[in-house]
Amino acid sequence: MPIEDESTDVSRKWLGQQGTDHSFRQMARLGSNLHVNGAMMKIRHAGVDKVVRFGHWKPSQFSDRCLMLPLHSLGERIVVLGPSNAGKSTLAVALSKKLGFPTIHLDQLHHLPLTDWQQRPEAEFAALHDAAILRDQWIMEGNYTRLMPQRLARATGAILITSNHWLRFSRYLKRTLINRSDRAGHLEGAKDSIKWEMIHWILVKTRNSGAKYANILREAELPMVECHTAEALNSLYRAWDLPSRR
């Protein structure tokens, strides 16, 4: 049976337990046919708020099986958040191919094409952002916290991905030096170059930004999945049968 079908049945079993505070062990048994190493899931129903972070617990503390939200439970407007070079753009494109929804890369709205990532005037960027979120369907990747309130008000689901800052730094160097025009999220005609402010942004300023984004998403109370490691993200691709990462 396909994973989505199994997880849908499991989700119904969970949601049928109205107001019951299940233990992690009970949750693991419900999702015994689904596997997302290192992923985090959030389930809300009748006052129940459970979070499972497999990237932060020892294997002996819980089963390596968990209840995985089916992809369709995130709805038709999905936000993808996470620190720079965590894989947001690639995941957004994979989701778009799977679901048939358009991809919106906020970095492309925030910067002018045919430049070395020159920013648009703030009012122009905000107008493009607010127009984009009014569409019926989208996969929107990018952060820009100042514009999140209206974005999350329109969103139907969320994915947060993070990974080690040194891994993200190496990805930044690779993508900047190679500067492939077919890279997910690439700015049209961009004349890319390594920037010290970007290095500082990745290694210092946003090193632990995942916690901030997680808190914002919890307050928004959207169906949400989190992956805190590269291994967890790979498991998410397999669980949802997404196109392979390049």
Image: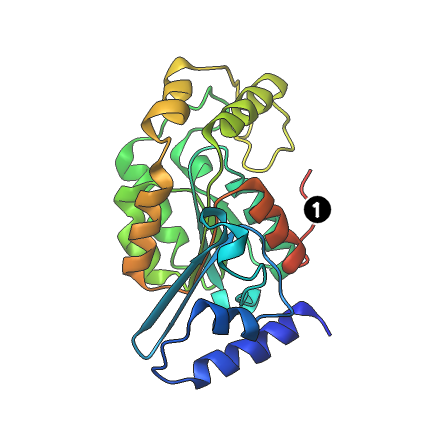
Rendered position, 243 above or below 136: above
Which residue is depicted at the point 36% across and 81% down? 20
Q: x%, y% of residue 84?
A: 44, 33
Rendered position, 224 above or below 209: below
- Residue nearest the observer in this picture, 207 or 92: 207
Which residue is depicted at the point 46% across and 58% down? 78
Residue underneath mark 1: 244
Which residue is depicted at the point 65% across and 75% down? 5
- Residue nearest the observer in this picture, 219 or 42: 42
Q: x%, y% of residue 34?
A: 62, 65
Which residue is depicted at the point 36% across and 27% down? 119
Q: x%, y% of residue 74?
A: 48, 65
Mark 1 lies on a secondary structure that is loop
The answer to whether one can see residue 75 in this image is no
Q: Is residue 244 left or right of residue 202?
A: right
Q: Looking at the rendering, in which quadrant would you find the C terminus?
A: top right
Q: Looking at the rendering, in which quadrant would you find the N terminus?
A: bottom right
Specify the quadrant of the image occupied by residue 220.
bottom left
Q: x%, y% of residue 230?
A: 57, 41
Q: Spot the residue most to the front.
A: 60
Q: Is residue 175 left or right of residue 41?
A: right
The answer to whether one can see residue 184 in this image is yes
- Label 1 Cα neighbours within 10 Å, binned few <14 / some 14-19 / many ≥20: few
**In the image, what residue type sits under mark 1?**
Ser
- Label count reads 1
Q: Is residue 18 left or right of residue 69?
A: left
